[in-house]
Amino acid sequence: MDHFNKSSHKTFSIPLIRLQGTKASKNGDKTILFNPGGPGGSGIGLIRGAGGRFNQMLGENYNLMSFDPRGVNATIPKASCYGTAEQRAEELVNLPFDLEYEAWKMYAKAENGAKACDDTMGEHGWYINTPQTAADMNSILDAIGQEKMYYWGGSYGTTLGQTYAQMFPERVARLVIDGVSNLDEWYNSFVFEEWLEDTDKVFYGFIEECYKAGKRCPLNSVKKNGFKAASELQTFIDNFLDNLEKAPIPVYLNNTHYGAITRQGLVANGIFPSLYMPLAWPFLASNLAELLKGNTEPAFLAYSSSWLGHILTDETNNFVIANDNWNTGVKAPVHGLQPVQNFTRAIPQQSKLVSKYRGFDIYRRASWSIPTTHNFHPHYYPAYPKVKTAEPILVVSLTWDLVCPLASAKKAFASFEGAGFVEQKSYGHCSTSMPSLCTAKHVRRYFDEGVLPEKGATCGVDGEYFPGPDGSSLTELSEEDAELLEALEGLAAQPIFKPLSPAGSLFV
């Protein structure tokens, strides 16, 4: 349970999964450890769902292994704040989002929820945090007889990867962080200020790519005379969302299926999650186009259920981020109904699309009753000297990442001595969200040979945001590249790295 205090005999049971490489034994039986993000993403699910694609991408020289981090999925005990699954589902459905009129509900839910989390998990709940999980990874290495860490983490997996590299730099052989979080904010900031920095750029990138696609994107046809520029289409959609905020649209399909399309529901269950995966953009554009033309049924059927209900199966997210952060609960800068409301109102809006739904996350951090039990403090340059790992790490970032902006990746890159960096010029979340032969070859070369990208390395993508009916327009590829691209397209077609979800913020 506690790697740093051997007086306790309590434990967590951590399930492992491994996909063996056919040539791994010839390579010293090296194993790459994966973390799928979240926090709360299942490593078991990652390898079962995408292990074959990663195997195609990285080759047969490695065993691929992952695990459910403490508190997640099949671990024992599993993180929980609720007595029943029905209670959890009800809480997710009834989350408050309106800071102006529902602050009292945010406060009450946060206060009661914190007590329920502590009460339900007991002492185990105190040790569901990232430094403990980093130490768990050493236990896994020791169990399989591997001295050095080979690792690939995306989204929250970069928080875990950076934490591991700073806590155990001597064990790092290959470590890829992809879609990078700001480690300093994660541990030290009561409010995460950077993570939504590029969210609107991704949203407007969706609109711009749609406009450039012409007839291939149905949004271009919602206005009788069309649009003369991407900015005109953007204004049209922004105005629609503003009006929807003031006047939700009632929808009646039959006497058992009816409701309303609200701005918050459309953004939370449709637009925001679709922006993570550009291959979902044509479907989003089709539903939005029908909605803008007055046909509410497609958007209502697609987005009336909670996106989160398909992502969150436990409360690991609550525990990990609140337990990691040094400024929650009694150490939070503000407490109480009115102070937290005033504090939240004063925060500059990072994103026009989603920042207005903040509030509950801040109440939750202010109310968190479990104390921080770890002693880890992140070191970011220039406040601290650069961290020297046994072998240099590799930082991978999109130019426009929905929740892990390029600025965060650059700060991590600057904080590790000798690190490599590659920027993939695309939208989405993590490099696997769009296929890029260039990025994949950099990652594979790094794992195989320890070779880092040249300074200033950038990569394009091998695919279109709004493809035509005949599919890709790529030139002829070698057999090897064609197989690699097939793997990358498979990874891009499913959510590999789980959305970064800071402490119940926004829609969590």
Image: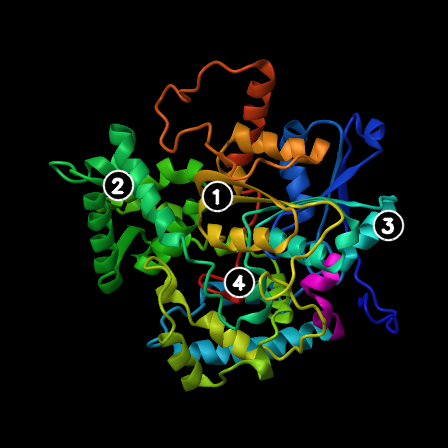
Q: Which of disc 2 and disc 1 is earlier in sequence?
A: 2
The CA span between labels 1 and 4 is 19 Å
Residue position marked by numbered label 4 in the rendering: 502
Count neighbours of disc 3 (C-alpha within 10 A) and say few if under 14, some if 14 to 19, many if 20 or more: few
Q: Tell me how far mark 2 sits from mark 3, CA to CA.
A: 54 Å
* Disc 1 versus disc 2: nearer the observer: 1
Magenta span:
123-134
Residue hosting label 2: 289
Residue 7 placement: quadrant: bottom right
Question: Can the viewer see residue 405?
Answer: no
Q: Of 273 and 302, which appears nearest the observer?
A: 273
Residue 493 - label: none
User: Mark 1 near mark 4, Cβ–Cβ under 8 Å?
Assistant: no
Q: CA distance from mark 3 to mark 4?
A: 31 Å
What SS does tag 4 mark?
Answer: helix
Measuring from the top left, give residue 17's x and y in whole percent: 75, 43
The secondary structure that most of the magenta stretch takes on is helix
